């Protein structure tokens, strides 16, 4: 067995490093000293010091923590979907879960009066849950849920919902959904201490459940019949994995929009580091994804002096070539 | 007569309209290696799937250690019965050792970690199947014969007293077939394991099997010692092929040789 404890420790250190780095990065001029003061809770000196403290503690830190949670959640969810569907190209988005979340959030933004900011995450969560259940029920047969049907139904439902999103954006009254385009590409700018606080328990619970299911996920790699004969209650583990991974992805979409490719590529990177056993893979993928997204967000904020890129654009820019590499390495095998 | 570990009584099974098993009766005794022969599509795999609980018979009764398979919990059953399929996964992403250790699952609990005993059992299974030197490779790096031994090792690791083997030698050359039956007879002799092996190796089965069950047209057509079952008449009726059956001069076991059509 490989010794992977040190690798996971290093990944944890890398995640903390990325969060610290992001505190020092941004368009506003905040000195190294001011960041340290703010973190240490030392009294800020003068009005510029107070502003600096606010930027660090109320803007940059929550944003970095949001990136940490979102990146980690998307990646562990990706690990789960890849095991569930026995498909290296599966990710949280392939089953239409994210599209469901997006429809839920946009519906809230369009229909609810005034500042619909607060119910938005809840509606996104609801949308994800509805889309996930629809796909699961459509894919289900008397003999159980087959992986092929699950993917097929996910792609169909996802395509329909994505078209629906375009329709909603096109037909929305001007100015009704500002920032929708950004949100659809993934945006960590919504990170507030409160949001981070709301998201934290979901991500912690979801990732813990996946970690506890890791032996089951290992066995799922054998295929349904062999896993069943090896003692796994296959249908129960499938359902638990599916629900957990979907809701993990759904609650993340609610606060950060559609950030693609993290859930797809990070599990593969983590596999290179710690192998395919899920007891190591789930935590390693979480930490690697967290680090990756925090760094991607730093890049998104630094690329242009005047504004910023949606972080989803950065992850897609780096993710799409990797996706192609994966496809080519497997000789185009789906 | 020792107690039955596996038994089927009047088992019928159909896929949609097509009836595959039409009243199968058979028993496998404690510590016995019984070989299930019969032409392609006769329902050997189906019968094994019924014993392992993957399929339920449409009528008739099946029992594992006296109880119907459906009455066991998944993990409880996996501690009693292990299964070796005919096509081991080629592109499995784990090392041979990790793959074999998956067999310990029913002893570990869904959420638990692996113990020293788990590692010892995995090592023992690897050793029995001659895979100790290959344990760090991935399954894809092994030859077909080594890979099949890997699946047997995983089943051994599961620690069950009863084993079902579904055409485990289907893709193997003669060396690996012999190797495979050697492992099975050692398992039976040293560990007291009972096995039901579905196979197409008529002569090898005669060499290693204590009892042969010949499945034909949805029923057990003949059952008994190799020399009682493997007769030209029985083989013709089951497989539709002319053979001569004589004795292997070296071992005295029945030898089945197909005759060329004239």
Image: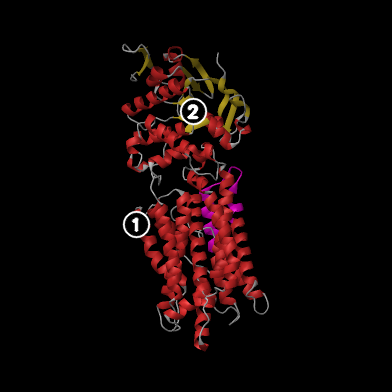
Q: Nearer the viewer, residue A48 or A84?
A: A48
Q: Secondary structure at mark 2?
A: strand
In which image quadrant can residue A314 be found? Answer: bottom left
Main SS category, magenta section: helix
Q: Is residue A187 visible?
A: no
Label 2 belongs to which residue?
A: B163
On the rendered structure, is A259 left or right of A113?
Answer: left
CB within 8 Å, label 1 to label 2:
no
Residue at x 49% of width, y 29% of height:
B164
Q: Nearer the viewer, residue A40 or A121?
A: A40
Instruction: Give, as a single range, the part of the protein colored magenta.
Output: A135-159
Q: Nearer the viewer, residue B242 or A211?
A: A211
Q: Please say which color scheme the image uses.
A: secondary structure
Chain containing mark 1 = A
Q: Nearer the viewer, residue B186 or B205?
A: B186
Pinpoint residue A273: horizontal percent, then vertical percent. 38, 54
In which image quadrant can residue B247 be found? Answer: top left
On the rendered structure, is B170 left or right of A120?
Answer: left
Residue at x 32% of width, y 26% of height:
B174
Pinpoint residue B198: horizontal percent, then vertical percent. 46, 26
- What is the quadrant of the N terminus of chain B in the image? top right
Q: Is residue B145 magenta?
A: no
- What is the quadrant of the C terminus of chain B in the image? top left
Position of B14 relative to A80 (above/below): above
Label placed on residue A157: none
Q: Secondary structure at mark 1?
A: helix
Q: Is residue A47 visible?
A: yes
Label placed on residue A328: 1
- Crowd around label 1: few <14 · some 14–19 · many ≥20 (10 Å): few
């Amino acid at each position: 067995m490989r010794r992977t404890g040190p690798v996971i420790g290093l990944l944890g250190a890398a995640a903390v490093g990325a969060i610290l780095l992001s505190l020092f990065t941004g368009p506003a001029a905040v000195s190294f000293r001011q960041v340290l003061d703010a973190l240490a809770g030392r009294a800020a000196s003068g009005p510029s010091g107070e502003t600096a403290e606010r930027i660090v503690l109320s803007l940059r830190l929550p944003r970095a923590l949001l990136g940490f949670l979102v990146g980690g959640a998307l990646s562990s969810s990706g690990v789960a979907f890849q095991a569930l569907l026995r498909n290296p190209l599966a990710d949280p988005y392939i089953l239409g879960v994210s599209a469901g979340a997006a429809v839920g959030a946009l519906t809230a933004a369009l229909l609810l009066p005034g500042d619909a900011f607060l119910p938005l995450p809840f509606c996104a969560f609801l949308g994800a849950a509805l889309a996930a259940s629809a796909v699961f029920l459509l894919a289900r047969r008397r003999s159980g849920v087959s992986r092929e049907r699950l993917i097929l139904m996910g792609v169909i439902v996802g395509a329909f919902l994505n078209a629906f999103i375009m329709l909603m954006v096109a037909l929305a009254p001007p100015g009704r959904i500002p920032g929708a385009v950004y949100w659809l590409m993934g945006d960590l700018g919504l990170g507030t201490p409160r949001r981070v606080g709301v998201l934290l328990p979901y991500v912690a619970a979801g990732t813990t459940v996946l970690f506890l299911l890791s032996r089951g996920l290992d066995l799922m790699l054998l295929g349904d019949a062999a896993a069943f004969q090896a003692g796994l209650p296959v249908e129960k583990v499938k359902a638990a994995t599916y629900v957990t991974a979907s809701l993990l992805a759904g609650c993340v979409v609610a606060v950060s929009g559609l950030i693609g490719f993290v859930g797809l590529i990070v599990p593969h990177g983590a596999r290179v580091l710690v192998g395919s056993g899920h007891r190591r893979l789930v935590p390693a993928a979480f930490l690697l994804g967290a680090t990756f997204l925090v760094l991607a967000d730093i890049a998104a904020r630094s690329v242009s002096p005047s504004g910023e890129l949606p972080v989803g654009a950065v992850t897609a820019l780096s993710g799409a070539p990797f996706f192609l590499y994966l496809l080519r390495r497997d000789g185009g095998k789906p | 007569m020792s107690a039955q570990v596996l038994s089927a009584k009047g088992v019928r099974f159909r896929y949609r309209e097509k009836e595959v098993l039409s009243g199968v009766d058979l028993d496998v005794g404690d510590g016995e290696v019984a070989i299930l022969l019969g032409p392609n599509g006769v329902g050997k795999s189906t019968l094994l799937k019924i014993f392992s609980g993957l399929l339920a018979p449409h009528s008739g009764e099946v029992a594992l250690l006296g109880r119907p398979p459906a009455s066991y919990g998944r993990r409880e059953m996996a501690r009693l019965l292990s299964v070796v399929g005919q096509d081991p996964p080629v592109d499995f992403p784990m090392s041979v050792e990790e793959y074999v250790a998956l067999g310990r699952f029913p002893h570990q609990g869904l959420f638990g970690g692996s113990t020293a005993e788990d590692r010892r059992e995995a090592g023992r299974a690897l050793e029995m199947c001659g895979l100790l030197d290959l344990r760090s490779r991935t399954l894809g790096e092994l030859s077909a014969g080594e890979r099949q031994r890997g699946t047997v090792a995983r089943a051994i690791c599961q620690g069950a007293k009863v084993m079902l083997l579904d055409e485990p030698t289907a893709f193997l050359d003669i060396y690996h077939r012999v190797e495979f039956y050697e492992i099975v007879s050692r398992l039976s002799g040293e560990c007291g394991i009972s096995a039901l092996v579905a196979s197409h190796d008529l002569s090898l089965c005669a060499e290693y099997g204590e009892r042969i069950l010949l499945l034909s047209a949805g029923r057990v057509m003949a059952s008994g010692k190799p020399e009682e079952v493997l007769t030209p008449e029985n083989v013709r009726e089951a497989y539709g092929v002319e053979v001569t059956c004589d004795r292997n001069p070296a071992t005295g076991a029945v030898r089945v040789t197909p005759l060329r059509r004239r």
